[in-house]
Amino acid sequence: MASNARRLLIVAGMLYLVGALEGVQVLRQRRRGTGRSLVTAGADRDPASCRLLALTWWPAGIAALWAAAWLPRPSIGRRWSQRCLVSGIVVTGLGITLRQWAIVTLGRFFVAHVLVQPGQTVVSSGPYRWLRHPAYTGLWLEMAGIGLATGNVLSAVTCVLLPLIGRASRVAGEERELTASLPGYRDYARGKPRLLPLIW
């Protein structure tokens, strides 16, 4: 029981770290004068997907912690427990790295709502060479790693599938706006996966 409590503290710390990094982005955008809300931004061209994103991301992490704490039965077993924890930390770390790389690559064009800004151009460097929406892929990996780290099957499934619903909706909204309003985006997107290589 003590080892499960330690694991849950580590997983809660991972969730806190991911949330703190998102909070830093909120503060950066406010400082730049680009308002951002966790629920929706006034200028967002697809506010419904923004709400769905918020409703599927944080609740997935909270549900995963709850399931790991109160529903320990569908666990992977002690033999794989440590491997899951280490693998989950690595996957979350990869997600953080990919998301931050994507944010730095976009620079001033990174905003948390669907809106093509004046003077915006297609960015095809950094992780955008391989994926159209690597920042969202990073977010998804962060949560998938948190689910894996719990060592609980229900938590892992929740953290893989629930955030994917919000991501898919948000990506579809961005694709519509970028294709309609950003010159050259249609050519850039051709043959390049949106979120997951070889899948979508």
Image: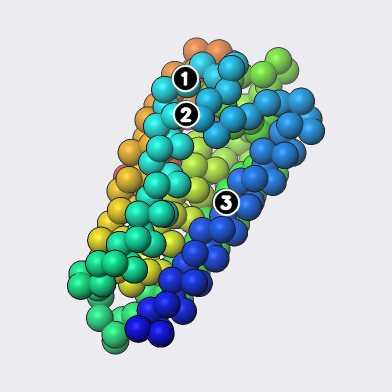
Which residue matches tag 3? 19
Rendered location of residue 34, percent (x, y)? 71, 26
Residue at 61 percent of width and 36 percent of height: 124
CB contact under 8 Å: marks 3 and 2: no
Rendered location of residue 49, percent (x, y)? 42, 27
Residue at 41 percent of width and 85 percent of height: 2
Query: Which numbered disc flags the more N-terminal residue, 3 or 1?
Result: 3
Q: Give the residue type that dot 1 points to.
A: Asp
For marks 3 and 2, give the CA distance: 16 Å
Rendered location of residue 68, percent (x, y)? 32, 67
User: Mark 1: few, some, or many residues within 10 Å (few <14, many ≥20)?
Assistant: many
Res 150 seen here: yes
For marks 2 and 1, give the CA distance: 7 Å
Residue at 34 percent of width and 68 percent of height: 69
Q: Is residue 200 left or right of residue 53?
A: left
CB contact under 8 Å: marks 3 and 1: no
Which residue matches tag 1? 46
